[in-house]
Image: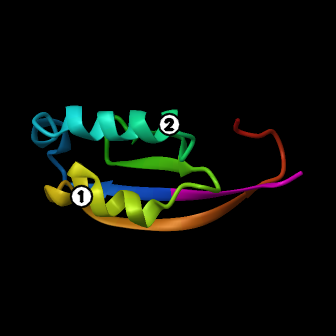
Amino acid sequence: MAQHLKLLFYDYVEDIVERRAPHRPAHLGLIAEWVADGRVVAGGATGDPPAGALIVFSESGDPEEWVAIDPYVLEGLVTEWRVEPWTVVAGGLR
């Protein structure tokens, strides 16, 4: 059976590693809360050094609600974001 998830893609400011430090605990706490209640399946930075991030939302998760309260977005660390639907037909994320 297919899973219908949502992917949130972030593009970060160039100096994200330096600028995220004061906001990182709140950002990671928020994602931990959403993972615990099932709204987020997985998430993390992309690139080395990080250039962006990918967060996978369950069917009950709302990426736009997340963006409205994420400290990284509110503090201007995210330059662009977009949401894409993802229909998982092989493997799966539980």
Q: Residue at x 19, y 44 (%)?
A: 16
Instruction: Please give left or right for residue 16 compared with residue 56 in the image.
Output: left
Nearer the observer, 29 or 37 = 37
Q: Earlier in the sequence, mark 1 or mark 2?
A: 2
Label 1 with label 2: CB-CB less than 8 Å: no
- Residue at 34%, 61% in the rendered image: 67
Q: Is residue 4 magenta?
A: yes
Using the image, tell me which numbered label, if any, was put on residue 6.
none
Residue type marked 1: Val
What separation in Å lies between label 1 and label 2 (alpha carbons)?
19 Å
| Badge 2: residue crowd in 10 Å (few <14, some 14–19, many ≥20) | some
Residue type at mark 2 is Val
The residue singled out by tag 2 in the image is 35
Q: Quadrant of residue 75?
A: bottom left
**Residue 21 placement (x, y as % from top left):** 13, 34
Comparing marks 1 and 2, which lies closer to the viewer? 2
The picture places residue 3, in percent across and down from the top left corner, at 77, 53
Residue 67 visible to an observer of this rendering: yes
* In this view, 39 is above or below 21: below
Q: Is residue 65 magenta?
A: no
| Image position of 50 (left or right of 38) | left
Question: Who is closer to the viewer here, 71 or 84?
Answer: 71
User: Helix or strand or loop: what does disc 2 sit on?
Assistant: helix
* Magenta region, main secondary structure: strand
Report the magenta residues as a range: 1-7
Label 1 sits on residue:
73
Residue reaching furthest to the right: 1
- Image position, residue 6 (x, y; %): 59, 59
